[in-house]
Amino acid sequence: MIKGNKGEWSEFYAFLKILTDGKMFTADKNLEILKDNFHIVLKIIREETESRKSYDISKQDGNVVIRDEKSEFCNIVEINKIKSKVAEIFEEMKNSNGTTFQVLSAEGVMKDLRCIQIKASNIHKADLTIVLHDKKSPEFPELGFSIKSMLGSPSTLLNASGATNFTYKVVESFSEASSENNISAVREKSKHVYDAGGHLEFVSMDNEGFRTNLRKVDSNFPQMIAEILKHYYKGKASKISDLVDSVSDDADFCKKLDLNKRDFAFKMKRFLSDVALGMTPKKEWDGYASAHGGYIIVKEDGDVVCYHIYNRDKFEDYLYDNTKLDTPSTTRHKFGDFYTENGEKRIKYNLQIRFVK
């Protein structure tokens, strides 16, 4: 039997829930379901490592038609047979302990639906591809959705890596010994620099591709994120919305970039949704969403809601109010220590964005 963590099992649960409900409910910025605002589901497509399977419920006759594109296998399963197990799967998944675990009640369902894994192949940004009945379009495009779970530990929106390091120059007006690496925490080092009369100036990003991607949001956006990081590691705040408030209070910085709080918040919201829907640090971004349908969220009570591309404003508000910066491993990502380069004392900060819950 397959094992997975709560995020991976939540992905499989979302697939079952949407398939058996036959619809996806949208939500407001607080994740509250908008009961009168939903999308009719015609087909769901899952990308497994060795095959691509489609689950067609467009006939609305109480059956799901399963097709495996590789083997050309075809089968029909009654939806009610699957639906009767969905709540049981959720409860077992929610109440399971350990990093990874089995969900025994899912075994029969996986067999009926010919599923050999619980999450999409890692090469795809979209976790589920869904065909919706769209009153606004005569076509039936395949739309990719990314799935996030509110069960277990808060998931990341932007994963840390060497590509998300930002480099700063330490400008000192104090003794050289005060910036030695004898202070353990990254925030303590930053605080020590400023408390002793020094400050940090943004120099560069470690990854040119990520810098180029950020400049697609705004030509000055690398500097904006660099300033956000400085305020975070100075201990000003951790939530994205609070950090934007903090930076916006810096009159000199805002004047230099001709920036006001409203514009900064707008650009940050757009950046967060771009990351959610396709932008990654290590790959050149063309400006288009690869998870181009939107976002699906599994809530703690078992409800599954979506933010469709049509209600992107609500999605952006949700991301803005529910994400924060986090400090990843300093040793793994090689940041947080003072060092000397080109005769300058420098330090790197790392960008990682995580959901509040």
Image: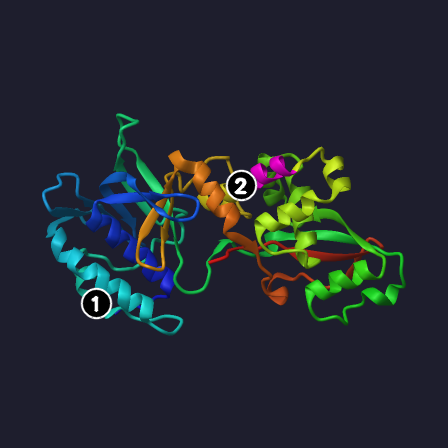
User: Can residue 279 be spotted in the picture?
Assistant: no
- Asked if 47 appears above or below 5 in the picture, the reply is above
Would you identify the image quadrant in which residue 182 lies?
A: bottom right
Question: Which numbered tag is attached to residue 105?
Answer: 1
Question: Which numbered tag is attached to residue 89?
Answer: none
Residue 333 in the image: state x and y as whole percent.
61, 61
User: Can residue 316 be spotted in the picture?
Assistant: yes
Residue position marked by numbered label 2 in the rendering: 269
Amino acid of disc 2: Lys
Write the residue at 70% across / 53% down. Answer: 230
> Magenta span covers which residues?
261-269
Residue 338 in the image: state x and y as whole percent.
76, 62
| Prevailing secondary structure of the magenta residues | helix
Amino acid of disc 1: Ser
Mark 2 vs mark 1, foreground winner is 2
Would you identify the image quadrant in which residue 87 lies?
A: bottom left
114 is within the stretch colored magenta: no
- Nearer to me, 63 or 24: 24
User: Which of the marked residues, 2 or 1, is nearer the chain's N terminus?
Assistant: 1
- Is disc 2 placed on a helix, strand or loop? helix
Quick one: label 2, few (<14), some, or many (20+) residues within 10 Å?
Answer: many
